[in-house]
Image (tube, helix red, strand yellow):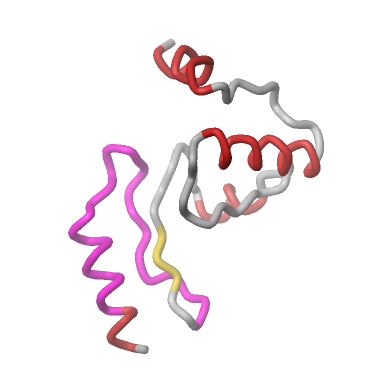
Amino acid sequence: MWQLNSNVKDGVLFSSPATDAERAETAAVCVVKLAVKLPALIDGVDNRVERVYTGWPDRLYVIGTDGRIRYKSAAGPFGFSTKALESSLQEVLKAN
């Protein structure tokens, strides 16, 4: 229930979108209202990317410039390791 209250407080409580356009509109509102500073990518309503990357509920990835996955965290928020993420980012940066 805490998440619902938080979503109401933050003004980001929406019905599930039925189309890709509705999902994009919802995401755009969330990015603005939550002041998201990172680039946001949106999966289609078919959730194809989520199924491939197992990104739910949330997960951190580092993708190399060659497009290959260099790091995949455990499911978040408790599976995140900032040390492992930092190490992976440093490796990718060194390779470039």
The quadrant of the rendering that contains the N terminus is: top left
Q: How many marks?
A: 0
Residue 15 locus on image (x, y percent): 70, 21
Q: Is residue 57 above or below residue 67?
A: above
Q: Is residue 95 above or below residue 53?
A: below
Q: Which residue lies most toward the bottom here?
A: 96
- Is residue 81 inside the magenta stretch? yes
**Residue at 46% from the left image edge and 51% from the top image edge:** 37
Instruction: Left or right? Give the position of 64 relative to 85.
Output: right
Residue 33 locus on image (x, y percent): 55, 33
**Residue at 50% from the left image edge and 23% from the top image edge:** 10
Residue 27 locus on image (x, y percent): 64, 40
Q: Is residue 91 above or below residue 16?
A: below
Residue 17: quarter of image = top right
Residue 57 locus on image (x, y percent): 46, 37
- Is residue 2 inside the magenta stretch? no
The quadrant of the rendering that contains the C terminus is: bottom left
Instruction: Left or right? Give the position of 87 relative to 32.
Output: left
Q: Is residue 89 above or below residue 44?
A: below
**Residue at 33% from the left image edge and 48% from the top image edge:** 74
**Of 33 and 54, the residue lying toward us:** 33
Looking at the rendering, the stretch of residues picked out in magenta corresponds to: 66-91
Residue 91: quarter of image = bottom left
Instruction: Left or right? Give the position of 58 relative to 43.
Output: left
**Residue at 70% from the left image edge and 26% from the top image edge:** 16
